[in-house]
Amino acid sequence: MTSAGTQGMVGISIRGTTLRMAESAQVAGESRISRLSQGRVRTAFNFVSLQDQSLIRRYAEDINRLYETADFQVSSGVFILDANMVMIKKVPIDANLQGERLKNHVHWEVRQLMINPLDQYIVDFEPLPADNAKDYKQVVVVVARRMVIDYLKEIFKNTDLQLRAIDVDVFAAQRVLAGNYEVNEDEYIALIDVRKDNLQFSIIKGATFHLSQELDYHQDGESETGKHDDEHRARLISKELRRIIIDYKLGKSVEDMNAVYLYGDGVTDTILEALQNTHNVRVDRANPFKKIKLASQGSDPIFQSQPETFVIPVGAALKGL
């Protein structure tokens, strides 16, 4: 949401109470992941915790502890917000609008959508590549509550890191995909963040953001223990992905995707195999280290067996590089 530097970056993500960091660096003109680490925060980062100013120091201590233990060398950081903490929307814009006029129009569009005054939000946007067949262009607009951004700034004032940018998880994941996989301009790829309580779907066309949607788990799929089983999650993924494809006229079935990549803490062999057996399209774990080189210190088993859990912090670390 803000620009990052180019000498190296530490990507920071908090999912539940799991804190992950990835450090990138430029080596001989090539982006590499130089360090990875995983720890915990004592309190999950969400809208509820933002009401407690006393937690600012605690978050800073938890981030510093992991930063120092892993011996990170880069002092610039990018923090990743969960998509459910922001609003993401594509807005059609007159193709001739530029500069301040474009900014004013985007802000006008946002005011139509928000209940509270615009000064309570931080608005960022990025124009998408122009389609010569259309007389308008589209911009991806991200709206975050100002209180969230201010809270994060206060956290990082108490850390060894300088907060250079704030990003959103779906964009970080798409950055990882574009950096590791071949993506053709006219092909659609689905990325699915499998989480404990919900699923986050995003679609890219080529390497460009196309859409994102979230699906919460419902009571009807719970087992006797109150937990969703993996086969139910796989069915939910198939059903919701098919609905998205049809609703947005991307095709008629999941097979119209060029590929489907899963990432996040909830990815299991059972979910992956169920989807692979159901759909005649490539379904795989997203691997942030497929092409992007990883330093040897990342040989801890979790980095090898569950690389998909580091998609978000790696995507953050790659921002601006």
Image (cartoon, rainbow, N blue to C red):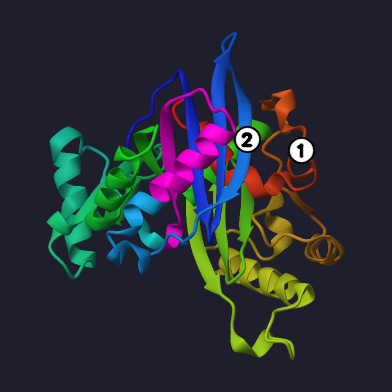
Of residues 313 and 151, the one drawn nearer to the viewer in this rendering: 151
Is 261 placed above or below 275 here? Answer: above
Is 171 placed above or below 88 here? Answer: above
* Disc 1 + disc 2, Cβ < 8 Å: yes
**Quick check: can you spot residue 1?**
no
Instruction: State the image coordinates of residue 191 (x, y, percent, origin top left).
Output: 62, 53
Whether residue 212 sits left or right of residue 310 in the image: it is left
Q: In which quarter of the image is the N terminus?
A: top left
Of residues 199 and 25, the one drawn nearer to the viewer in this rendering: 25
The amino acid marked with disc number 1 is Asp
Residue positioned 67% across, 33% down in the render: 180
Residue positioned 74% across, 91% down in the render: 224
Instruction: State the image coordinates of residue 237 (x, y, percent, origin top left).
Output: 67, 69
The amino acid marked with disc number 2 is Leu
Please give the residue where the numbered disc 2 appears in the rendered image: 36
What's drawn in magenta, residue-wise? 59-84
Q: Quadrant of residue 78?
A: top left
Please give the residue where the numbered disc 1 appears in the rendered image: 300
